[in-house]
Amino acid sequence: MAVLVVEHGAGEGPYAAGDALRRAGLELRHCRTHLGEEVPGELLDVDALVVMGGPQDAWRDEGFPSRRAELALLRLALAAELPVLGLCLGAQLLAEAAGGAARRGEAGPEVGWEPVRPTAAAASDPLFAGSGPDDRRVLQWHSDTVALPPGAVLLATGDRYPVQAYRVGASAWGLQFHLEAVAETVEVFAAEEPGAHGGGAALEAAPRRLAELAPWRDAVLDRFAALVAARSEHTRTRAFFTPRAADWEERFPDDGPRYAKAVAELGLTEGQAVLDAGCGTGRALPALRAAVGDGGTVLGADLTPAMLRAAAAAGRGGTAGLLVADCARLPLPDARLDAVFGAGLVSHLPDPAAALAELARVTRPGGRLALFHPVGRAALAARHGRALTPDDLRAEPNLRPVLAAAGWDLARYTDADDRYLVLADRRA
């Protein structure tokens, strides 16, 4: 598990935030923009994004050559629901990326140990819950502020600048203050800006203020780290599929008839209930609806919201109920379904055995499972420039016992150049 940390200056490291992430077993990958390191265009193999502070202005490109690339990365993280933590400049960039605005603060620089107050909304926030009603004196070192993005939740406020901490969606936080601060942080800031009004007093008060702040600081940062670790499996899937959702079908526009043919082999009848597990953009949904008729039930479940939005944009939301759901933890009762269809599913599951067992749980005895791909294993491997390996789970000798352990009996196995199709029956 890894976290990308974007830094803008030699003294703007993650400090206590990095310590919390490492305590949770997370690897830190640094992108030091001040050294000319390029901001990545994707978030592959990354479980969270942390954007640090710096002297740049979040609201303009001047003196900030990586600004647009960072905003693009933040927007990608927000779309994929990747956990994000923005600190000081990072919080201002997050606001810009999410539709708010950063600007020069009219009240002038805020430097030193200043009080912030948790809002009522903080009591139910995943990071700030338990903060209590009392002020917290935190390290401030900024001149800019933000207007909250639409729908953002204000979590902490202050007298000089009202926006001190906020959340966008369910997994992105912006903190105007330096919660990551340790003794070295204050020393570096004071040395870099020796003339900053309040800097000397901040340095002198640092030992006492840091000792007071440390329990709350560590609790908040440890909660963020724990959230990152807990969501890791989901995060990587969403980070891969989100930027590809809009043009997913354009890559293979002729696969529709193959989906329809595979659906036909499920043997569905009028009025039955079927799930498209990992439905993506929903290419199988119209065929599934035609098979069960208006009186049947068709559900499409996918972990990536962007894929479901693409399905709805293609008009497929009217043929099925679309669920943001993990195939290993479905919000369905036991034996609810007559059949499950899964296209390209097994290779994208972090724990295939658990997911196959969950699909068995929600399928009635005698129900059917179809695992499908428009091309066979060899053709798919060649498409990606890979060789087939003996441990490929989709190979029949490997898949059969996994299916059996999950409650499925393999009924048919086809692995041809133009189709991969596995049919299995739910054991009574």
Image: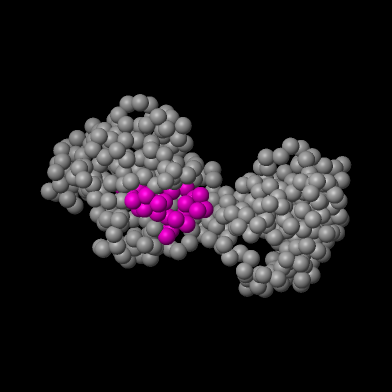
Q: Does residue 207 lie above or below 1 as drawn?
A: above
Query: Is 76 within the magenta?
Result: yes
Q: How far across and down, in percent of the image, does residue 322 sit?
A: 66, 48
Residue 199 visible, this angle: yes
Q: How far across and down, in percent of the image, does residue 154 sit?
A: 38, 38
Q: Does residue 390 lie above or below 218 as drawn?
A: below
Which colour assignment does the render follow?
A: one colour
Residue depicted at 80% across the width and 64% down the height: 261
Q: Which residues are magenta?
A: 72-101
Residue 407 visible, this angle: no
In the image, is 145 to the left or to the right of 355?
left
Query: Is 197 within the magenta?
Result: no
In the image shown, does 63 or 208 lie closer to the viewer?
Answer: 63
Number of numbered markers: 0
Residue depicted at 49% across the width and 50% down the height: 82
Q: Quadrant of residue 341?
A: bottom right
Q: Quadrant of residue 107?
A: top left
Furthest-left residue in this view: 195
In the image, is 15 to the left or to the right of 230?
left
Q: How far across and down, in percent of the image, does residue 262 sit?
A: 80, 61
Q: How far across and down, in percent of the image, does residue 211 sit?
A: 28, 32
Q: Quadrant of the C terminus?
A: top right
In the image shown, does 284 or 303 lie closer to the viewer?
Answer: 284
Q: Does residue 236 lie above or below 215 as drawn?
A: below
Residue depicted at 74% across the width and 37% down the height: 333
Residue depicted at 39% across the width and 47% down the height: 149
